[in-house]
Image (cartoon, rainbow, N blue to C red):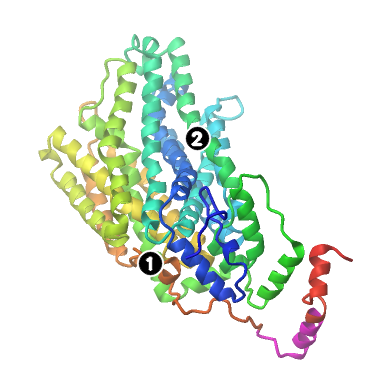
């Protein structure tokens, strides 16, 4: 097998340039993709995980940090009007804003990544996340605009960037990864969410301890004044603002990545340009690589007879008008929807669970904020992070399908036990069941619903399909926040802060069962190439001569002769690309 020595380095390997001497485009494509699929795991894969995983670190950090900072926002901005507690409507709107933005970002960025290319879109979403995160940390009220309105605006903007990161990172990672380790590599990217959640809780704990002397004398949120308010105002800004810091370290690498080989072969048909750009990127230099214009023109002339238009909305609609492919989309989107109703409903309101199990304190503000951060750390370290990495370790052994179906089944049982036997559970047993739920969320459908949509669809619409599937997941998250979150605290009292928690758990059990059913619609992708999963045979001819329907009409014939005699001759191409006229 050909070696990659002197051809690639870092996170992305230079595949198209290895086979420039092969004339048959179908054979060239097969050999290059086989080189990617059979590559052993190396440092370039590790760097790929870090560069693409930073977005998910920021995603999880920003989405879950808000759960820790809403108490602080109430102290600072609603001290006089609401006794230091954030109003329910404002709390819900702030939490839902990022999910609403994510729906837009997932669909729009997913389609644009198929239309314009992964490279052109990658990095834009991270710039949006970084900018919007910094803007949130600088928000303040004014006489013209309310604080909540400004914060929601920037959280929607951040959500659009986060949403764009889902299809781009998943698909880019899948298209660069080898077949044997593709599941583990994509799962490791997604596992950065657990690190993001952990970092949010740690940062909340650090800033709380840093202001211990100021917070400890204050007995209740309604008694926080002057120095206390100033300290809390500083705290929430530090917590939110830190979420954008890791993105700076990955931004350069995202903006300068080469186009994925699969997109180059199946959509762009411009192998020479992709090879040169990739080589320049891996050499550590900035900008695009120099391309021999005449050689590029000849390559384009050779490929023009095979070329098809860029992916369009019509092509996506036609693809999913087939019953088999439509049901595949129902499987990926439906499973993600049912999952996120319970996943976000539980995680963004984990404070309700912590209050039920007694992990809260009202001695003073310091104890209240510290226990909230420590409680989150306990839940994350005990359930979430181990679950993510169990998926990384087992997904290419057990397979995506069995992990997803078994995860949904176990979650159905866990939520049913909590919901129907809530009164019989002790605080310790409730905590254990909650931790187990977190574990099987992440060693289960939370990871696999992210991985599968990036594998089961063909290259030309892969990002669009992943974006649609992810958008349905975020719609489920919005429903959880708007519909089920208020239900948990309905009729709450000081002694019973979450009277309807058991009822919501019963509903979540039903959603998990529905998720298990839709999972049967998703095919197994373990140890299969992306082309094989998409239905392409090993002897398939991808590049075929393209004819227009009016080819033999007199007008089309005359126009065709005109084109062939002008633009498509070697002289015409030289005039076009070398500006000889």
Q: Where is residue 301 in the image (x, y as percent from the top left)?
A: 71, 73
**Residue 354 figure quarter:** top left
Q: Is residue 383 left or right of residue 114?
A: left
Q: Can residue 312 be seen in this view?
A: no
Quadrant of the image containing the C terminus: bottom right
Q: Residue 528, labelled with which disc? A: 1
- Look at the picture and state if 134 lies above or below 466: above
Callout 1–callout 2 Cβ contact below 8 Å: no
Q: Is residue 93 left or right of residue 394?
A: right
Q: Mark 2 points at which residue?
A: 246
Q: Position of residue 276 (x, y in %)?
A: 65, 57
Q: Where is residue 538 in the image (x, y as percent from the top left)?
A: 44, 76
- Binning the other alpha carbons within 10 Å of mark 1 as few (below 14), some (14 to 19) or many (20 upward) gives some
- Dot 2: element: helix
- Look at the picture and state if 42 lies above or below 298: above
- Dot 1: element: loop
Q: Can residue 346 be seen in this view?
A: yes
Q: In this view, does 143 lie to the left or right of 336?
A: right
Q: Which residue lies furthest to the left in this view?
A: 424
Q: Where is residue 499 in the image (x, y as percent from the top left)?
A: 22, 36
Mark 1 vs 2, N-terminal side? 2
Residue 568, magenta (yes or no): no
- Look at the picture and state if 206 lies above or below 522: above
Q: Nearer the viewer, mark 1 or mark 2?
A: 1
Dominant SS type (magenta): helix
Relative depth, front residue between 457 and 545? 545
- Look at the picture and state if 191 lies above or below 70: below
- Give the magenta-colored segment's residue range: 549-563
Relative depth, front residue between 8 and 420? 8
Looking at the image, which residue is at 40% across and 37% down? 196
Q: Which residue lies furthest to the right in this view?
A: 581
Residue 558, magenta (yes or no): yes
């Amino acid at each position: 097998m050909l070696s990659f020595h002197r051809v690639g380095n870092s996170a992305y390997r230079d595949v198209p340039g290895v086979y420039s001497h092969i004339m048959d485009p179908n054979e060239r494509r097969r050999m290059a993709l086989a080189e990617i699929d059979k590559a052993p795991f190396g440092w370039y894969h590790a760097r790929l995980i870090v560069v693409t995983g930073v977005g998910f670190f920021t995603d999880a950090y920003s989405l879950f940090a808000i759960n820790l900072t809403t108490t602080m926002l109430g102290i600072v901005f609603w001290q006089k009007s609401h006794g230091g507690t954030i109003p329910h409507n404002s709390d819900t709107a702030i939490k839902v804003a990022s999910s609403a933005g994510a729906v837009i970002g997932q669909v729009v960025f997913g389609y644009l990544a198929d239309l314009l290319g992964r490279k052109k879109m990658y990095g834009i979403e991270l710039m949006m996340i970084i900018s919007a995160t910094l803007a949130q940390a600088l928000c303040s009220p004014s006489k013209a605009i309310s604080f909540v309105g400004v914060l929601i605006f920037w959280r929607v903007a951040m959500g659009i960037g986060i949403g764009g990161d889902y299809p781009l990172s998943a698909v880019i990672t899948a298209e660069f990864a080898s077949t044997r380790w593709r599941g583990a590599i994509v799962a490791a990217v997604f596992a950065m969410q657990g690190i993001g959640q952990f970092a949010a809780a740690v940062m909340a704990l650090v800033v709380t301890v840093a202001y211990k002397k100021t917070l400890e004398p204050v007995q209740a949120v309604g008694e926080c004044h002057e120095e206390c308010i100033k300290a809390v105002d500083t705290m929430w800004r530090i917590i939110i603002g830190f979420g954008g810091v890791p993105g700076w370290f990955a931004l350069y690498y995202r903006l300068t990545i080469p186009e994925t080989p699969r997109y180059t072969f199946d959509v762009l048909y411009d192998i020479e340009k992709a090879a040169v750009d990739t080589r320049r990127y891996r050499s550590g230099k900035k900008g695009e690589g120099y391309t021999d214009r005449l050689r590029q023109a000849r390559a384009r002339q050779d490929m023009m007879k095979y070329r098809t238009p860029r992916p369009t909305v019509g092509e996506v609609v036609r693809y999913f008008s087939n019953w088999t492919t439509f049901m595949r989309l129902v499987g990926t989107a439906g499973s993600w929807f049912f999952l996120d109703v319970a996943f976000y409903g539980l995680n963004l309101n984990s404070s309700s669970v912590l209050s039920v199990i007694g992990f809260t304190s009202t001695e003073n503000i310091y104890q209240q904020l510290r226990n909230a951060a420590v409680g989150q750390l306990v839940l994350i370290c005990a359930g979430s992070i181990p679950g993510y990495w169990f998926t990384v370790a087992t997904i290419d052994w057990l397979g995506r399908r069995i992990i997803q179906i078994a995860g949904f089944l176990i979650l159905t049982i866990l939520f049913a036990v909590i919901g129907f036997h809530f009164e019989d559970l002790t605080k310790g047993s409730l905590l254990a069941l909650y931790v187990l739920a977190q574990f099987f969320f992440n060693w289960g459908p939370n990871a696999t619903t992210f991985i599968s949509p990036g594998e089961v669809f063909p290259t030309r619409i892969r990002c669009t399909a992943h974006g649609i599937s992810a958008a349905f997941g975020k719609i489920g998250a919005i429903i959880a926040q708007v519909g089920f979150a208020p239900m948990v605290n309905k009729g709450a009292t000081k002694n019973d802060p979450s009277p309807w928690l058991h009822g919501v758990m019963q509903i979540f059990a039903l959603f998990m069962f529905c998720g298990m059913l839709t999972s049967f619609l998703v095919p197994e992708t373990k140890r299969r190439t992306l082309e094989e999963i998409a239905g392409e045979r090993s002897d398939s001819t991808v590049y075929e001569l393209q004819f227009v329907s009016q080819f033999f009409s007199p007008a089309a014939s005359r126009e065709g002769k005109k084109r062939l005699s002008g633009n498509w001759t070697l002289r015409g191409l030289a005039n076009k690309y070398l500006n000889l006229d």
